[in-house]
Amino acid sequence: MTDTAMAATALGKRFGRRGGWALRDCTFRLPAGRVCAVVGPNGAGKSTLLALAAGLLAPTEGRVTVLGTDPASARARVGYVAQDKPLYPQLSVAETLRVGADLNPGRWDAETAERIVSAGDLDPRKKIRSLSGGQRTRVALALALGKRPELLLLDEPMADLDPLARHELMGTLMARAAQYGTTIVMSSHVVAELEDSCDHLLLVGGGRVRLAGEIDDLLAAHTRVSTATGSTGPTSEDGSPDSAPGGLPELAPHTVVESRVTGRQLTALVRPAGPLPDDWRTSTPSLEELVLAYLRNPQAAPLTPAEPEEAAV
Amino acid sequence: MTTLALSPDSSKTTGHAPGAGWLFRLHRPALYVWIGIVAVLAAGLVWLWGPLTDSSAAAWREYNEFCLKRGSCHYDPDAIVRYKDVYGYTTGALTALPFVVAAWAGAALFGRELEHGTAQLAWTQGLSPVRWLATKLIVPTVVVTAGTGLLVALHRLMWSAGDGRIDTAKSWYDSFTLHTNGPTTVAFALTGLTAGALGGVLLRRTLPALMFALTCVAVMRVLADQVMPHLWPAVTRVTSLDDGYRSSGLGVDSGLVTATGAHIADPGCGPTSVSSACKTVYDDLDATGFYTTYHPESHYWPLQLTTTALVVAVATALAVAAFVLLKRATATPTRGGTEASV
Amino acid sequence: MVEYRIDRHSGVATYVQIVQQTKQALRLGVLQAGDKLPTAREVVEATAINPNTVLKAYRELERDGLVEARRGVGTFVRRGLNTTPADSPLRTELDAWAVRAREAALDRDDVAALFTAVLDEHFAAPDPNGRTDLHSRTDRADAPVRPSRTDLHDMHDRHDRHDPNPGDPS
């Protein structure tokens, strides 16, 4: 048994020979049993990353492994729901689930699939083409969960759902994670949507991984500080103020993600490199603050604790 | 028992590979339509083969025996027209069948699935892309071969029944009858199928894949007609300038023969028995007779089978191209893949 | 059986909310010694929160000696908290005090402020790990160690993993 659900090493994907890179230099490790949020703006490379992990795309460079093997070999153990929830429009809901059973002989969990569908008050005889977006999501999730995946990859799973269905289906997913230790990876461009459900974060921006790790660790590694400018040491002694990374010499030893001066007030989000001065006011950022700070500042140094893959034994 | 040492959940995690049940579930309407088309055409061909051939042959016999000799007679012109019409419809439909297969394969079987992501859905269920493509090619190949094969066989039987009995019956080398009487039609249909697969995988769009498949079949048909006469050694027959061309069959080449035995172009004057003025023309050219290079009816099967083999080879090449493209675009098991899982 | 209600906008960390609500249920006698807490699966199915959050809360309650996890069975209440039944003398005194406060023209907020001030004088500050006190110095050293998924009593596959927690003082 492996305890790495998903790992990427220098993973990159370019569409077309001269096209731009949708994803590049992607290196991270997701331990098994986590619920991981893949967050980033639209077009950041989230879908590409998930499609690579699902084996739908071949990487242009680097490699991705899922469940300790290559995506093609892990196919039967990985569930995937694409962003636009493709389903066969000509089939009924019940027929769709039967196709799921046909495609997953020996693995199919008909009871689970039917339970997810019936929780949405869906008539099994209804044709897929007549379903609403939320109902399609429900059927797509039923197909993905029916195959008893060890790793579930969900691309914007909640986008089409009303708040009630969103809560209920998220509950179903969490129950799955609790009961079977299923690793769940879901993408969204709305951080708040995933904050309570996820314990691991992958922040993707501009085709690169900006943050990767346990959410608690990532929050703990960052501090929001506010202080009066020039309160710690004279500015002039540190040379020209603008030369320091982040532009403010007070913050010099620390990694600055974002800083702002309003009047004489300096506020910043930093990764402290050591103890902060006692007279600074500090607080832990919220996940949303953290994510937004990184997205607003594409030049901020990424935090992706690179663990050797061999650690998984 | 040593077998117990094997991973007990290997069967549970891997399962066995899916069969073709899903394919029938997805394309059941198409299968029913196909069965319907084949049944209607088969019924038409059987009707033609039996009652229509008989009544048309009887009408022709009456016409030839009485009308031409006595001037007044009683024959059934409707029977002759009905045979001719139904023959035209069924042969036309059978000729069009490979195009129908191509359109369906390009649009419904492959293009639409790749455009709307349902192919990708199947690939993330228990089905690898290669297996998905293989199932989608093998099962329809069997169904299309069975249906088209049956119709071609019936057409051949029907045509043979009328041959020599009906004056307006199509010759064996008539460009439509030539193919509908033999397995080239089956090969064209299979080309439509694999061209649909390649178009779908290549273009990933419904309409372009459909157009691609149709174009492939059309080009294949034209090419087959061009190439067919050269796939088997033809026969050359020389006739006198008086007689003109006398041979009938699938023509390859024709013209004038000179005293030295050289083949030269025919100025198109015609046999000297029709127009004596042509004699001076031929004398100027030093022509001694007409030659025709052609395939007699005995060449039918060699021509059919070699052409079929060629078309099937092209269809196979299209399928191989589709597999290569699909494998390149999607993740395939790496050699180190299983090692990494240990 | 206790049912947790998670308020996403309260600013209180989710696991703290579970701890607080469990303690509240113990105080009110909704939960008593021997009662079974809902399984992590049941909680997350109803609340859509991360299973680790529930386990973290249960671990906290276990460390306080309020509950105990029995492998493969579930998490059970070990002891209740000091309950104050409706007819207790303390409640009667407080009731009388509230009447006097009202007669003294104090409004609800005044009373609450007064009560909190007295409370702070006599009792230690509440749980410091919540995200509520945003202005205190962040000190993750005393943050509880994340529970690992191996604690799940109803989990099928078990495997150990080292939890990379930089805040762990060890």
Image (cartoon, rainbow, N blue to C red):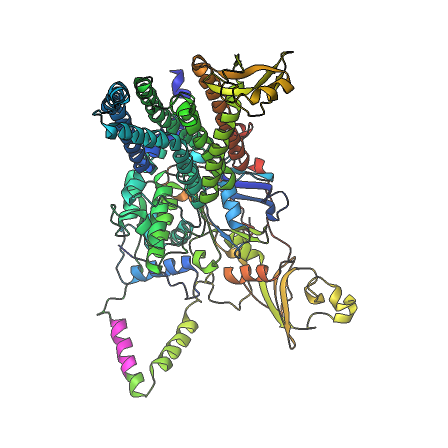
Residue B280 in picture, x, y percent from top left: 60, 20
Residue A250 visible from this viewpoint: yes
Where B71 sits versus C140, above or below?
above
Query: Does C38 lie within the magenta span?
Result: no
Judged left or right of residue C29, residue A155 is right
Residue at 58% over, 18% down:
B256
Q: Quadrant of residue B164?
A: top left
Observer-nearest of B225 and B126: B225
Query: Does C98 lie within the magenta span?
Result: yes
Total marks drawn?
A: 0
Observer-nearest of C81 and B79: B79
Judged left or right of residue C44, residue B302 is right
Q: Quadrant of residue C110?
A: bottom left
Residue B7 visible from this viewpoint: no
Q: Quadrant of residue A291?
A: bottom right
Residue at 42% over, 23% down:
B178
Observer-nearest of B158 and A12: B158
Judged left or right of residue A65, residue A167 is left
Main SS class of the magenta portion in the image? helix
Where B171 sits versus C140, above or below?
above
Residue A211 in picture, x, y percent from top left: 57, 52
Residue A294 in picture, x, y percent from top left: 58, 59
Observer-nearest of A167 and B322: B322
Where B226 sits versus C137, above or below?
above
The magenta span reads C89-99
Residue A108 in picture, x, y percent from top left: 33, 35
- Which residue reaches farthest front? B276
